[in-house]
Amino acid sequence: MNTPKVQITHPKPTVKAKKALIWIDLEMTGLDTVRDEIIEIATIVTDDDLNILAEGPVLAIKVADTVLNNMDDWNKNQHGQSGLIDRVRRSTVTLADAQTATLEFLAKWVDKGVSPMCGNSICQDRRFLARQMPDLEAYFHYRNLDVSSVKELCYRWRPDVANSYQKGGTHLALDDVRDSIRELRHYREHFFKLLD
């Protein structure tokens, strides 16, 4: 297995964060949860104020060339332009390796069953994890913190706020996780009324 790079952005707490949030993003060969495969994973742990505590391993996951060749044109173009296809072809990391490395990282920061699964359209990621990385999926609380749900409400009730946030759109897992956190910060600042 490749040794994953873990970047600690804040000092490791002496005790696990009780309200820490685990953010995750997957890149896949498509959206079919039965046929398509996970090809990249990234995680970030934040506190409940959305301050980043640590970034986990960012791993391109090896799949057969036939799987990559069978992707639709959108995925071939997007993952080709981002360099992800080349990273996947060079990778020696298996699904099991990626699951283990991610779980080892998360266990240092958050106890099992504490954090909801956080991200954008996170139900789709959860479906893929349930099939391909079930131990990782089981590490999360059953609830989700889906930024896409907030975005849908914002489009309906405050389209000016929704349209004032521009996503990065690289479709690389770590960039997308960071973007989800920034997007929720945007909604917290401009959409929710928080009392001091």
Image (cartoon, rainbow, N blue to C red):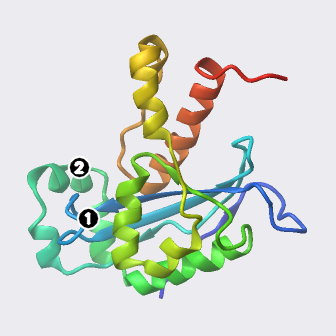
Q: Percent position (x, y) of residue 26?
A: 40, 60
Observer-nearest of 143 and 175: 143
Observer-nearest of 5 and 163: 163
Who's the residue at 49% across and 79% down the image? 99
Disc on res. 167: none
Q: Percent position (x, y) of residue 91?
A: 36, 78
Label 1 crowding class (10 Å Cα cut-off): few <14, some 14-19, many 20+? many
Disc on res. 85: 1
Q: Is residue 114 above or below residue 23?
A: below
Who's the residue at 29% across and 62% down the image? 28
Q: Which residue is mark 2?
A: 78
Question: Residue 7, located in which quarter of the rendered image?
Answer: bottom right
44 lies left or right of 136: right
SS for tag 1? helix
SS for tag 2? helix
Q: Amino acid at mark 1?
A: Ile
Who's the residue at 52% across and 75% down the image? 138
Q: Amino acid at mark 2?
A: Gln
Point out the tag, 2 or 1, that comes first from the N-terminus. 2
Q: Is residue 17 above or below residue 119?
A: below
Question: Residue 134, located in which quarter of the rendered image?
Answer: bottom left
Quadrant for the C terminus in the image: top right
Residue 193 in sight from this viewpoint? yes
Q: Percent position (x, y) of residue 162?
A: 44, 21
Q: Percent position (x, y) of residue 188?
A: 64, 27
55 lies left or right of 10: left
Q: Is residue 191 above or below residue 59?
A: above
Label 2 crowding class (10 Å Cα cut-off): few <14, some 14-19, many 20+? some
Residue 61 in sight from this viewpoint? no
In the rendered image, the residue lying farthest to the right is: 14
114 lies left or right of 96: right
